[in-house]
Image (cartoon, rainbow, N blue to C red):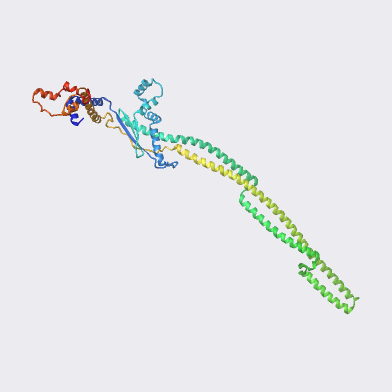
Amino acid sequence: MSPMQFLSILRARWKVALAVLLLTIGTTLAVSLILPKTYTGSAAVVVDVKSPDPIIGMMFQGQLVSGYMATQIDIMTSDSVARRVVHDLRLTDKAEVREAWQEDTGGQGDIEAWYAQSLSKYLTVAPSRESSVITVSYKAGDPMTAAAVANGFVKAYMDTTVDLRNDPAKRYSTFFDSRAKELREKVEAAQAKLSDFQKKNGIIGTDDRLDIETQRLNELSTQLVTLQALAAESESRNSQARLQSERMSEVLNNPVIGSLKAEISRQQAKLGELNNRLGDAHPQVHELKANLAELRTRLQNEVSRVSGSVGVSNTVNRSREAETRAQLEAQRAKLLKLRGQRDEVAVLQRDVDSAQKAYEAVQARLNQSSMESQATATNVSVLTPAVPPTQPSSPKIVLNTLFSIVIGIALAIVAAFFMEWLDRRVRSSEDVITALDLPMLGVLPKPQARRLQSGNARGAMIPRRVLARLPSQQPRGA
């Protein structure tokens, strides 16, 4: 179809098209004016997912933000939040609400749950695409109600998020409290066991005492080595005293023995002189011999005394060596026992430390859970509270009128073509060519007669001989 044919059809059926257009616009206006006015209250909240949690210090990862925002929207549209709104605003206290509930349910069920479902039907929660802002809108017939319910949903949502975080924290706090009591009892039992062992064995400072006893053992070892050397030396000197006592250094270096030997030598020289001068029978010679014999006896006794002192020294050294050896063995046994006690104390101390660490870890989690269960802060902030709207959100008369004009024009065109399809007419030379599928030889000018003018205005009926050759009734070229 050419544009000229399209316009000719509209020109011919303009009354039908205009009637359809006016009917569509009038109907839309009437319906818009009859429908009750609806007001929309809107509030906006900001969900902070960038800052870390003030208690646990956790920060959301980038890939979790979208899922977190979807969860917040589900929470805001949940039945729990809606029931909290009904409870906080006391919406079920109104007589008309109770009457509607009685009519709808016959008084069965919970009125708050029923009204919460009604509220959810008119609630719209829309997140922003590129930000963490969530818009909460509620539609109602009264502007005050729309704003109040929208703000009520925001407050109920914030309270619900606090409860959702506090309730698990309270359960965790109870669990960690019982575990902390058990672990504290274990710490006290392990500490008591360690204290009893230390008290029983007289242990104050295991490491200091072990160092002292080790030092004493080293000293005894040194003393034993020294005494062994002295005993070996005294044994050698004692053997020499038994075999060659006169050649001992103690005997040779003894001043008494030296003086006695000198005296004996002098007396022998004097005896030889008197013997040569007076003879053996002289009393002085006998007296001198007696003195000489006494000096030799004294010398022998003195040598025996000195050599005997070497034997006594050897006995003393051997006794001291045996005593020191016994002390060393006792000290070694004492040190081994002390090390065993230290190992046992270390085991008991590790038990105490392990129980203490477990108790401190649970106590830290208990403190954190207690703080979380008592926290009232939330990461949600009110960006824009809802205010009573001054204009209704629906029906939108201007928008509906514009929309009805568009729809009316479309329906008018459809109606015009539908009427043309029911009553087809030839309105131009193109219609003749299309209908007869024959070339046009010429076009006569419009007649000036009134009858022909009237016929032209209405559109001439196609003669029967022409209709007989229309393509819809006879094949082309027949």
Q: In the image, 466: left or right of 130?
A: left
Percent across and percent down for residue 116 are 38, 27
Percent across and percent down for residue 188 are 58, 41
Above or below for 152 versus 194: above
Splitting the image into 4 quarters, where does residue 460 fall?
A: top left
In the rendered image, is residue 292 in sight?
A: yes
Asked whether 144 or 288 is in front, the reply is: 144
Q: Residue furthest bottom?
A: 277
Query: In the image, what residue occupies the spot 45% across and 34% down?
Result: 167
Asked whether 180 or 421 is in front, the reply is: 421
Query: In the image, what residue occupies the spot 75% across and 59% down?
Result: 316
Q: Residue furthest left?
A: 448
Q: Residue furthest front?
A: 478
Percent across and percent down for residue 186 are 57, 40
Asked whether 95 or 283 is in front, the reply is: 95
Splitting the image into 4 quarters, where does residue 284 fall?
A: bottom right
Asked whether 429 or 410 is in front, the reply is: 429
Q: In the image, 377: left or right of 413?
A: right
Above or below for 330 versus 94: below
Percent across and percent down for residue 314 are 76, 61
Q: How many marks?
A: 0
